[in-house]
Amino acid sequence: MNTENTTGNNIESEQPPYCDVQTEFIHCVNNCMRTTGYTRRGLAKRMNEALQALEIEIDENKLNKWFALSQSTSMPIHYLPALLWALNSTEPADVLLAPLVIKAVDNRAILLQEAAQCDFEIKKLEARKQKLFEKVNS
C-alpha cells in the first residue's frame, strides 16, 4: 500500500509523525519573548487583554512556569492564540505543526511576499523596457 501523500504534508499519512516538540516549542516561545520588545509583564498583560472574555489572569510567574523546561506545568493550549498575538508571531504554532509538515498562515507575510513578487516583476519589465528603448535608439 502506498502511504505517500501528494499534498507535501503528513496529515493524511498512515505513519504517525514524531510529535515530541515540547522542548523546541518552549525554546521558540522563549526566543520570541526575548525578541518581541515586550517584557514578560507586558506579554502577560497582552495575553490578559486577548483572554479578557475568559476572565483569565496571567502574570509573569505563570509565563515563567509554563515556559521553563524544568517545570511540569504547561500553558493550556486554548491560550495559544493569545500567546501568538502577544508575541506578534506564529513561530510557536509552526513548531507545533512541524511534525505534520504544515505552517500557520500569516496573512501579513503573504501580502509582503506578493508585494516583493510585484517589485521583482516591475524590475523585470523595466529592464525589458530599457532594452526595447536601446534597440529603438540604435
Image (cartoon, grey):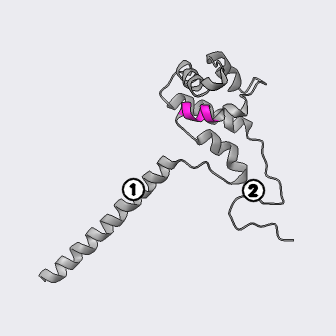
Q: Which residue is mark 2?
A: 11
Q: Position of residue 67 (x, y in %)?
A: 68, 27
User: How many discs mark residues in the rendered view?
Assistant: 2
Q: Tag 1: residue type?
A: Ala
Q: Main secondary structure of the magenta part?
A: helix
Q: Position of residue 17 (x, y in %)?
A: 79, 52
Residue neighbourhood size for the residue with mark 2, other residues' Cα within 10 Å, grouped as few (<14), some (14–19), many (≥20): some
Q: Give the residue displayed 78% in from the left and 45% down from the top.
A: 19
Can you tell which quarter of the image residue 54 is in?
Answer: top right
Residue 82 lies in magenta, yes or no?
yes
**Horizontal side, residue 59 vs residue 106: left or right:** right
Q: Which residue is mark 1?
A: 115
**Horizontal side, residue 80 vs residue 135: left or right:** right
In magenta, the rendered stretch is 81-87
Up the image or down, 54 lies above or below 124; here it is above
Q: Quadrant of the C terminus?
A: bottom left
Q: Give the residue displayed 55% in from the left and 38% down from the top.
A: 89
Up the image or down, 16 lies above or below 1; here it is above
Q: Give the residue displayed 64% in from the left and 19% down from the top.
A: 58
CA–CA distance between discs 1 and 2?
30 Å
Query: Which residue occupies the extreme front position in the image?
Result: 53
